[in-house]
Image (spheres, helix red, strand yellow):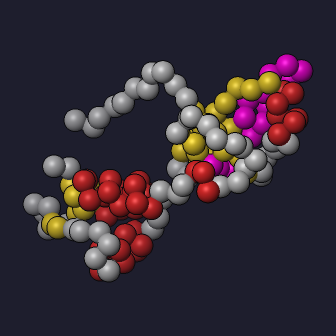
Amino acid sequence: MAEIRISEAATLLGVSDDTVRRWIDQGRLTAGQDGSGRQVVPGVALAELARSIAHNPSSLDHGAGRRSARNQFTGLVTRVVSDTVMSQVELQCGPFRVVSLVSTEAVTELGLAEGEIATAVVKATNVGIEARR
């Protein structure tokens, strides 16, 4: 079973190390020690907590109706590069940079500009996964 250090757990959840420690002290998250005596969180427990605190995308009102895509990342627009036909839109969604190529017409209609909040909706038929081991 994977054991995850406090700092990495905090990064994965998008919170501070102190928040993770507080959750451990409150019993919201279980922890143990690794072979070196460092505090670690079981990967399964972290995954369960991540699922429980994940925001419900349907509770956000971004003007969208119901959709089948489950992978939605809300973030801050950090860059828009446009020509007459296409635009590249970059969002910073927590620790993740998401880049999308959309029509310049869509950028204009959506009012996408640096500093705006937007949601990237991803629906893919193929998603690659990389493991550490």
The reply, left or right, for residue 131 in relation to residue 103 is left
Residue 22 appears at what percent x and percent y?
A: 36, 78
Q: Residue at x 77, y 50 (%)?
A: 116
Q: Is residue 27 above or below residue 94?
A: below
Q: Residue furthest bottom?
A: 26
> Does residue 88 show up magenta in the picture?
yes
Foreground residue among 117 and 133: 117
The reply, left or right, for residue 84 in relation to residue 35 is right
Main SS of the magenta part reads strand
Residue 82 in sight in this render: no
Q: Residue at x 47, y 56 (%)?
A: 54
Q: Is residue 57 above or below residue 111?
A: below
Foreground residue among 109 and 130: 109
Q: Is residue 55 above or below residue 99?
A: below
- What span is colored magenta in the figure? 74-89
Find residue 28 and report its image quarter.
bottom left
Q: Is residue 100 above or below residue 36?
A: above
Residue 1 in sight in this render: yes
Residue 37 appears at what percent x and percent y?
A: 14, 68
> Does residue 92 show up magenta in the picture?
no
Residue 104 appears at what percent x and percent y?
A: 84, 27
Foreground residue among 82 and 45: 45
Find residue 85 and report its image quarter.
top right
The reply, left or right, for residue 81 in relation to residue 94 is right
Q: Residue furthest left?
A: 35
Q: Residue at x 57, y 42 (%)?
A: 72
- Indicate the quadrant containing the C terminus: top left, top right, bottom left or bottom right: top left
Q: Residue at x 58, y 45 (%)?
A: 73
Residue 108 appears at what percent x and percent y?
A: 88, 35
